[in-house]
Image (cartoon, grey):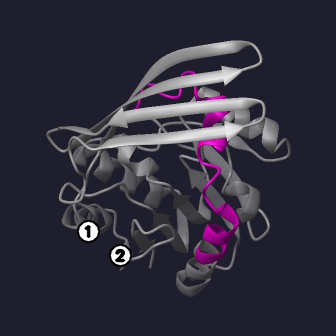
Amino acid sequence: MTEKGCTVFIKSATLYDAIYSWKNYADETEKIHALIQKHKGSSGNALLDVGCGTGAHIEHLKKFYAAEGLDLDDQLLEVARLRHPGTTFHYGDMADFNLNRTYDVIVSLFSAIGYVKTVARLNQTLHTLARHLAPGGVILIEPWFTPDVFKVGTPHATIINEPDLKIARMNVSQIEGNVSILDFHYLVATAQGVEYFTEHHELGMFTREEFAFAFQQANLKMIYDEQGVDGRGLYVGVKT
């Protein structure tokens, strides 16, 4: 998911699944499913994955739910639709989309919420999600790093070494205010040759208090899970 009016996965969308091949989406989905069943009070099983990316979580979520996806990145949605031809994917901004229906479960995973960038848009996003949530429904949001955890000046590298695909992605973490700046540098080698390109990502870093206020203003009961599905914590909101 990207900030309104901006697509950031300009060239890396088709590489996304290879870059994040280390993620165990099946295991994460089992944890997500358990939390949903623990907190959900509605009787339906309609689910919306907001900031769904290439649909990697949906691949496993649709075993339990009537799952749909939503994202603002056309390139990622194109990959998702090819992967899941029978699944509905919506183009929309998580802060102000309108699908004219409600869901029993809304998830926003792998820190997609960070792309809303500002506290004002975080509050707007929670209102939008709550409006699409059925009574007794549940929202799960996996946050991006908080300002006190994110480290400036840290070099990062991801290396993919497959027989027909080599990827080196590097960046050095930066901060502007409470926004983390990730300028990724890519080297990609295929049978067609070697390509170099860059991508600029900006993700807002929100405190637990800012999340709590956003949930409260959206009239959602908030529960915080310290570990979450991938060590980044998890916010659970229930529409009572």
Of 59 and 71, the residue lying toward us: 59
Magenta segment: 4-31
Instruction: Point out residue 180 in the picture as x, y percentages from the top left corner.
Output: 27, 41
Q: In the shown orientation, is residue 31 left or right of residue 213?
A: right
Of 167 and 146, the residue lying toward us: 167
Magenta stretch holds residue 13: yes
Q: In the shown orientation, is residue 60 left or right of residue 86?
A: left
Is 159 placed above or below 188 here? below
Residue furthest to the left in view is 177
Label 1 sits on residue: 212
Badge 2 or badge 1: first in the primary sequence? 1
Residue furthest to the bottom in view is 38
Q: What residue is shown at x 22% (from left), y 50% (from top)?
A: 151
Q: Quadrant of residue 79?
A: top right
Label 2 sits on residue: 222
Amino acid under disc 2: Met
Instruction: Point out residue 207 in the picture as x, y percentages from the top left corner.
Output: 22, 61
Q: CA distance from mark 2 to mark 1?
A: 7 Å
Instruction: Point out residue 157 in the picture as x, y percentages from the top left corner.
Output: 44, 40
Q: Would you say residue 97 is visible in this rendering?
A: no
Q: What residue is shown at x 49% (from left), y 67% (from top)?
A: 230
Amino acid under disc 1: Ala
